[in-house]
Amino acid sequence: MKTFPENRIQKRYIVDTTALVEDYHLGYRFPVKMRNYSIGGMCFESEYALRPGRKVNIQVEDPLPHPSPDSRYAEVCWRRKLSPGRRDQHFGIGVKFIPSILIK
Protein backbone atom coordinates (compact mmCIF):
# COMPACT_ATOMS: atom_id res chain seq x y z
CA MET A 1 0.00 0.00 0.00
CA LYS A 2 1.31 3.43 -0.93
CA THR A 3 1.68 5.84 1.98
CA PHE A 4 1.76 9.61 1.90
CA PRO A 5 3.44 12.05 4.31
CA GLU A 6 1.28 13.57 7.03
CA ASN A 7 0.79 17.27 6.26
CA ARG A 8 -2.12 18.01 8.58
CA ILE A 9 -1.92 20.83 11.09
CA GLN A 10 -5.46 20.86 12.52
CA LYS A 11 -7.27 17.95 14.17
CA ARG A 12 -9.20 15.84 11.65
CA TYR A 13 -12.69 14.49 12.31
CA ILE A 14 -13.69 11.27 10.57
CA VAL A 15 -17.16 11.38 8.98
CA ASP A 16 -19.21 9.24 6.65
CA THR A 17 -21.75 11.58 5.11
CA THR A 18 -22.62 13.11 1.76
CA ALA A 19 -22.21 16.64 0.48
CA LEU A 20 -22.82 18.55 -2.73
CA VAL A 21 -19.87 20.18 -4.46
CA GLU A 22 -20.27 22.97 -6.98
CA ASP A 23 -17.40 23.54 -9.42
CA TYR A 24 -17.29 27.30 -10.03
CA HIS A 25 -15.44 26.93 -13.32
CA LEU A 26 -18.02 24.59 -14.85
CA GLY A 27 -21.07 25.61 -12.80
CA TYR A 28 -21.77 21.91 -12.24
CA ARG A 29 -22.99 20.37 -8.94
CA PHE A 30 -22.43 16.75 -7.96
CA PRO A 31 -22.63 14.56 -4.84
CA VAL A 32 -19.50 13.46 -2.98
CA LYS A 33 -18.78 11.20 -0.01
CA MET A 34 -17.07 13.08 2.83
CA ARG A 35 -14.34 11.15 4.65
CA ASN A 36 -12.84 13.68 7.07
CA TYR A 37 -12.61 17.39 7.76
CA SER A 38 -10.92 19.97 9.96
CA ILE A 39 -11.26 23.70 10.45
CA GLY A 40 -8.82 24.14 7.55
CA GLY A 41 -9.83 21.53 4.98
CA MET A 42 -11.65 18.39 3.95
CA CYS A 43 -11.18 15.08 2.17
CA PHE A 44 -13.95 13.58 0.06
CA GLU A 45 -14.41 10.92 -2.59
CA SER A 46 -15.84 11.85 -5.97
CA GLU A 47 -16.46 10.26 -9.33
CA TYR A 48 -15.17 13.50 -10.89
CA ALA A 49 -11.47 14.31 -11.03
CA LEU A 50 -11.33 17.92 -9.88
CA ARG A 51 -7.98 19.47 -10.74
CA PRO A 52 -5.78 21.06 -8.09
CA GLY A 53 -6.38 24.81 -8.03
CA ARG A 54 -10.08 24.45 -8.90
CA LYS A 55 -12.44 26.52 -6.69
CA VAL A 56 -15.54 24.83 -5.28
CA ASN A 57 -18.45 25.43 -2.93
CA ILE A 58 -19.29 22.59 -0.53
CA GLN A 59 -22.75 22.07 0.92
CA VAL A 60 -22.88 19.46 3.67
CA GLU A 61 -26.22 17.66 3.83
CA ASP A 62 -26.11 16.63 7.53
CA PRO A 63 -24.90 18.77 10.43
CA LEU A 64 -21.27 18.03 11.27
CA PRO A 65 -20.70 16.56 14.75
CA HIS A 66 -17.64 18.65 15.65
CA PRO A 67 -16.60 22.27 15.14
CA SER A 68 -17.20 23.02 11.50
CA PRO A 69 -15.24 25.33 9.23
CA ASP A 70 -16.20 28.99 8.89
CA SER A 71 -16.15 28.75 5.10
CA ARG A 72 -17.80 26.39 2.65
CA TYR A 73 -15.61 27.73 -0.14
CA ALA A 74 -12.54 25.69 -0.95
CA GLU A 75 -9.65 25.18 -3.34
CA VAL A 76 -8.61 21.71 -4.48
CA CYS A 77 -5.09 20.91 -3.21
CA TRP A 78 -4.70 17.32 -4.39
CA ARG A 79 -6.46 14.37 -6.01
CA ARG A 80 -5.64 10.68 -6.07
CA LYS A 81 -7.13 7.87 -8.09
CA LEU A 82 -8.75 5.32 -5.78
CA SER A 83 -8.47 1.56 -6.11
CA PRO A 84 -10.95 -0.12 -8.47
CA GLY A 85 -13.99 -1.41 -6.63
CA ARG A 86 -14.12 1.44 -4.09
CA ARG A 87 -17.86 2.04 -4.30
CA ASP A 88 -18.91 4.47 -7.04
CA GLN A 89 -16.23 7.02 -6.23
CA HIS A 90 -13.07 7.03 -8.34
CA PHE A 91 -10.98 9.87 -6.83
CA GLY A 92 -9.92 11.06 -3.41
CA ILE A 93 -9.92 14.87 -3.30
CA GLY A 94 -8.31 17.12 -0.69
CA VAL A 95 -9.39 20.74 -0.35
CA LYS A 96 -8.44 23.70 1.82
CA PHE A 97 -11.08 26.19 2.90
CA ILE A 98 -10.69 29.74 1.60
CA PRO A 99 -12.50 33.05 2.13
CA SER A 100 -15.34 33.62 -0.33
CA ILE A 101 -13.60 36.71 -1.70
CA LEU A 102 -10.97 34.44 -3.31
CA ILE A 103 -13.55 32.49 -5.34
CA LYS A 104 -13.62 34.83 -8.34
Image (tube, helix red, strand yellow):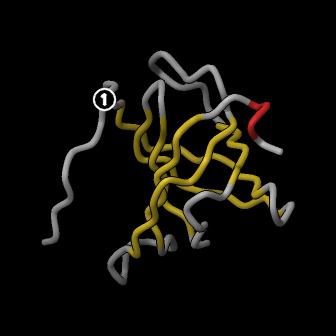
Residue 42 lies, in percent from the top left, at 48, 41
Q: Does 6 sit above or below residue 53?
A: above
Residue at the extreme bottom: 84
Dot 1, crowdedness within 10 Å: few (<14), some or many (≥20)?
few
Q: Does 56 sit above or below residue 93?
A: above
Residue at (43% x, 63% y) in the render: 92
Residue 104 lies, in percent from the top left, at 83, 45
Q: What's under tag 1, amino acid-wise?
A: Ile
Residue 30 lies, in percent from the top left, at 72, 61
**The N terminus lies in quadrant:** bottom left
Is 11 placed left or right of 21 in the picture? Answer: left
Q: Which residue in the structure is indicated by mark 1? A: 9
In front: 80, or 29?
A: 80
Residue at (37% x, 73% y) in the render: 82
In front: 73, or 91?
A: 73
Residue at (80% x, 55% y) in the render: 24
